[in-house]
Amino acid sequence: MKVSMRHIFASFMLCTLVAACSASHTAAPKAPVSPEACVAVIGTSVANVPPRDVPVIVVLHPGDVACLVSDSAGGIRAVPQAPANSPHISVRMTAERGMTLLAVKNDTSQGVAYRALMQLPNGPQWNETSIVPVMPGLFGFESWPQAIGAIALFEMRLETSR
């Protein structure tokens, strides 16, 4: 039986793929991120106002940080600061080299889901963007390859475990 280099290479790649998949299923889960205090840093721009019919929790601009906590009615609201030992969510918006990043740190015991509108710089129109829920005790990152002038978070809620 004649074995070609193509068959050897294919066998090698298949073995490598199987080993990688097996290792990823047996790896220990990553530990949640340690809670940290949150101090809000929100700009004072009022030029970027989202549509009135959207129940916005907070509007962020590049460089802003928002601290969010659960209220007694089960909703989420923005606060000026949140201590490390209390459940909270911190959200930071950054822009660098023409790209935008939204980092969400979930220091609660429940997952957090939300919706977001974004507005391009100097643009009047707000457009909804897709967002991935953030698991308890972890970071969630959303990024866009262009500059974004503002992001409005709304319909934010804590999710129960399934």
Image (spheres, rainbow, N blue to C red):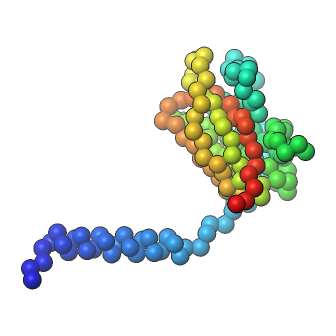
Q: Residue furthest left?
A: 2
The part of the image, by quadrant, that contains residue 55 is: top right
Q: Is residue 89 left or right of residue 134?
A: right
> Is 142 in front, or is 162?
162
Q: At 42% from the left edge and 71% from the top edge, which residue is drawn?
A: 20
Quick one: quadrant of the C terminus?
A: bottom right
Where in the figure is residue 54, as x and y percent of width and height? 72, 27
- Is residue 56 visible to the viewer in this orientation of the structure? yes
Name which residue lies at 74% across and 30% down.
56
For residue 132, side relative to residue 38 (left or right): left
The image shows residue 80 at horizontal and vertical percentages of 84, 38
How far from the left and from the top, in percent, is residue 140? 63, 49
Please count the marks in the image.
0
Q: Where residue 99 appears, x then y in whole percent?
A: 51, 35
Q: Quadrant of residue 156?
A: top right
* Residue nearest the observer in this picture, 44 or 9: 9
Q: Residue furthest bottom?
A: 1
Quarter containing the N terminus: bottom left
Q: Which residue: 84% across, 45% down?
A: 74
Residue at image coords 64%, 45%: 103
Which residue sits furthest front? 162
The reply to whether residue 39 is visible in this rendering is no
Q: Is residue 16 left or right of residue 110?
A: left
Q: Is residue 146 above or below residue 76?
A: above
| Relative vertical location of residue 55 with respect to residue 40 in this rendering, above or below | above
Front in this rendered view, residue 62 or 59: 59
